[in-house]
Amino acid sequence: MYHLLTTISLTSGKKLTLHSIHPVPPTYFEDLPDNEGQKETALLQIGKKLKDRQLPTIVAGDINDVVWSYMDELTNTKNILFDVRVGRGFYNSYNAENIFMRWPLDHVYVTKEFNLTKLERLSKIGSDHFPIYVKLGL
């Protein structure tokens, strides 16, 4: 699992926390060499950190899971994290290389302090994922 945790200071003086994550793929990929001996606990670890948060928080990244999975259960963050896509569509971000097989694997979750100003899937950039553009207000 890759996890970048940072505090961002805005020009307005407000601060926020950003968790940028890329957990290991779901358990059915456990036999892949990169995942040997790993278990997916990243989302639960982040969920524990969010229980005691003091700043508005964003959790974003390639979560290796679809939007219709059970994020609240994976993080134990019911009524803490909110998916910016809810009510707006799937925004399939993977597989940029196959027009017939696409899923929403890249996610942005925010705490209640944020409001969504803009959300769009951008054009292909050479990755197997499409970039997702999110503009938030605080």
Image (spheres, grey):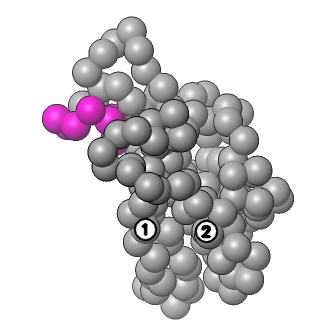
Residue ranking furthest to the bottom: 13
Magenta run includes residue 29: no
Residue 8 place in picture, x, y as percent: 45, 81
Q: Quadrant of residue 114?
A: bottom right
Q: Quadrant of residue 100?
A: top left
* Magenta residues (range): 125-131
The residue depicted at 45 percent of the width and 42 percent of the height is 30
| Location of mark 2 (residue) | 46
Q: Amino acid at mark 2?
A: Ile
Label 1 neighbourhood size at 10 Å, few (<14), some (14-19), many (20+)? some
Residue 101 relative to residue 118: left or right: left
SS for tag 2? helix
Residue 111 place in picture, x, y as percent: 69, 65
- Magenta span: predominant SS is loop
Residue 11 place in picture, x, y as percent: 43, 85
Q: Amino acid at mark 1?
A: His
Residue 12 place in picture, x, y as percent: 50, 85
SS for tag 1? strand
The residue depicted at 41 percent of the width and 72 percent of the height is 4
Residue 101 relative to residue 14: left or right: left
Label 2 neighbourhood size at 10 Å, few (<14), some (14-19), many (20+)? some
Taking 3 as reference, is 38 above or below it? above
Figure quadrant of the N terminus: bottom left
Q: Are marks 2 and 1 in contact (CB under 8 Å)?
A: yes
82 vs 116, nearest the viewer: 82
Residue 132 relative to residue 123: left or right: right
